[in-house]
Image (cartoon, rainbow, N blue to C red):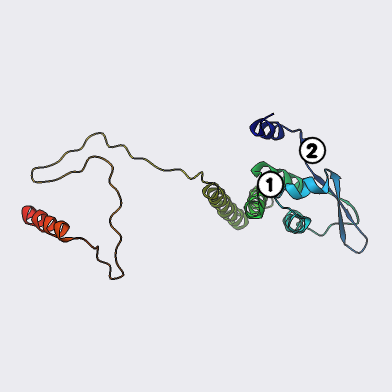
Amino acid sequence: MTMQAIAECDALAPLSRMPRLELSCASDGSLTATLEAGSPEEFASLFGASGREFADQAVHDLLNVALTAAPKPGAVNTSPVNAMLQAVRAVRPVDELEAMLAVQMAAFHHVTLCCLRRSQQSTATMEGRTLNLSQANKCARSFIALLDMLNRHRGKCTTQRVIVENVTVEAGGQAVVGAVGGGAPTNPGGSTPCDGKDRSRSQQTRRRAA
């Protein structure tokens, strides 16, 4: 089996392999997180990390975003944090740098929906609704910026191309058809260095234009 086939099989792996967290809250308010599914190695690879330290800190940060209220003693609802872990897994970070972007994207997505939910509550005032919609818009923009940054990091940035079909050149004007490269590098003084031939050619062009 080729490496590409192995990667495709791994992409189609069932969600049962997805590491899941189980949280419990003690009487003193301390939280204990245990792996309900998955191995510690799978948990660390979820963040593209070689060790548990980075993965543990990433989960701690996601928990601070997911748990908006102090948990009560007993079992804690882990659906929000496990959903964010699945979002991180969808990004498939290959190292800690990509994992940082993936964690922030998952957190911004969660906060965006929370702000939208608050804006639609029946008890929300017009001021509160406007504020939450504004925050949701900012979070959504931040999500797009992070996604664009991730694509650029992976070399997937898009290049815009403009096609000009008709060009009209008036009498005495000039036009260039074809690819135009960047200009020569400028020196620290701001002028563009050129040799004698370029300088005389530029002077002739200015005289014709006059």
Looking at the rendered structure, the kind of residue marked 2 is Arg
The answer to whether 107 appears left or right of 172 in the picture is right
Q: Position of residue 49 (x, y in %)?
A: 71, 52
Q: Which residue in the structure is indicated by mark 2?
A: 17
Q: Residue at x 69, y 33 (%)?
A: 6
Q: Residue at x 81, y 45 (%)?
A: 20
Q: Secondary structure at mark 1?
A: helix
The answer to whether 111 appears left or right of 155 in the picture is right
**Depth check: 131 or 204 in front?**
204
Kindly report which numbered mark, 1 or 2, lies closer to the viewer in this rendering: 2
Crowdedness near tag 1: few (<14), some (14–19) or many (≥20) residues, C-alpha within 10 Å: many
Q: Secondary structure at mark 2?
A: helix
Find the distance from the CA under tag 1 to the CA under tag 2.
14 Å
Q: Which quarter of the rendered picture does the N terminus lie within? A: top right
Specify which label sits upstream in the sequence, 1 or 2.
2
Q: Which residue in the structure is indicated by mark 1?
A: 88
Looking at the rendered structure, the kind of residue marked 1 is Val
Q: Residue at x 27, y 37 (%)?
A: 164
> Quarter of the image holding residue 63?
bottom right
> Quarter of the image holding residue 19?
top right
Q: Residue at x 64, y 54 (%)?
A: 104
**Depth check: 132 or 143 in front?**
143
Q: Is residue 48 above or below residue 26?
A: above
One can see residue 118 in this view: no
